[in-house]
Amino acid sequence: MGIPSSQVGIKATIITHLILLGDLNMSSFTSEFLDKLSFTTEQISTLRSLGEYRGKQALFFKQSPEALKSLQLVAKIESSESSNRLEGIEAPHKKIEELVLKDTSPKGRSEQEIAGYRDALNLIHESGEHMPFTANVILQLHGILCRYIANPGGRWKLTDNEIIENHPDGSKRIRFTPTKAHLTPNAIEQLTNNYSSAAQENRLDALILIPLAILDFLCIHPFSDGNGRMSRLLTLMLLYQFNYQVGHYISLERVFEDSKESYYETLEASSQHWHSNKHDAKPWLNYFWGTLLRAYKEFEERVGVITTSRGSKTELVQSAVNRRMAPFSINDIESDCPGISRDMIRQVLRKMRDEGSITVSSGGRGAMWQRTFK
């Protein structure tokens, strides 16, 4: 006995709908996945410590407003530099300073990419806590990120993409195969809706929901270019909405870059089996919390040093030097250490040179210093 044509049509519609949905239900925000999450005593302690830092940050904001303003400027420069450098986009540090601080016009592709990040970052610093996590906001941010380059931003990928690891010998390895292009708009819609529902229901701590949202965003990989930088912009935006303000003063992007091997390794580990909803988010969650904890500790240290005695100024200069991976000038350290005189900086640099922890290329005004890695 044949199947009535009406039923055939209904069946075909259902099958087509399921094909279009694909793996849209496979994410970190399904009830099944969230219900299975459990945490160790150590992880709970880390979350508690981050909550305590959030509670204390208001005290920091009241201390030395001018110094905090300088920290903000340094963080913007470092964020624009590090987030782009993680994607292989580089420019001279001095040029990045001009792009960020003087709002100069970019010249060349690298400067255009960095200027776009600068503009998106400024918007998030100013209004991030009021920007909803929606598909439209994500598209608008991507449009700003790409505003200076020829390829138009603000639209989802049109072709499937892959996350590739390039090796020095020229070989490549596929780290992850993201959501297909035709499924991307619905996948992002589902992600943002499910995140918003979970956040409003207070189902889990915000510091669990935020990194899960970033993980899913990167697994979807919704754009042909700029996904990594977008994920770091969205990280700041979501953190600001729950009053985790450290990114205004300490560059989270720089902390990510400082530990980039772990950054990529934990993302890869937590993306395995994501399509089948059997992934383990713990490696990425632990890394994310560790990054935020490191940023808050650095913020507390720097604010404490800024507002205490002259003897502690030495520690501030030493700390600024130790964060420098590339050669640096006295001007670089001056911008990192608001309120400390150039003579004091020279004194500390000479002492560190005599101790063998740094070297200097030459004397004079153009001298460049370099950490000694042992």
Image (cartoon, helix red, strand yellow):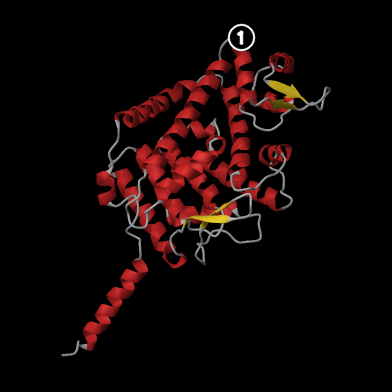
Viewer can see residue 127:
no
Above or below 326: residue 266: below
Quarter containing the C terminus: top right
Extreme-front residue of the structure: 169
Q: Residue at x 51, y 34 (%)?
A: 247
The answer to which image quadrant residue 52 occupies is top left
The crowding category of the residue bearing disc 1, from other C-alpha atoms within 10 Å (few below 14, some 14 to 19, many at least 20), is few
Residue 122 rendering spot, x and y as whole percentages: 57, 42
Callout 1: SS = helix
How many marks are shown on the rendered structure? 1
Viewer can see residue 110:
yes
Residue type, mark 1 in image: Gly
Q: Residue at x 32, y 50 (%)?
A: 29
Mark 1 lies on residue = 311
In front here: 108 or 105? 108
The answer to which image quadrant residue 371 occupies is top right
Is 241 left, or right, of 96 in this rendering?
Answer: left
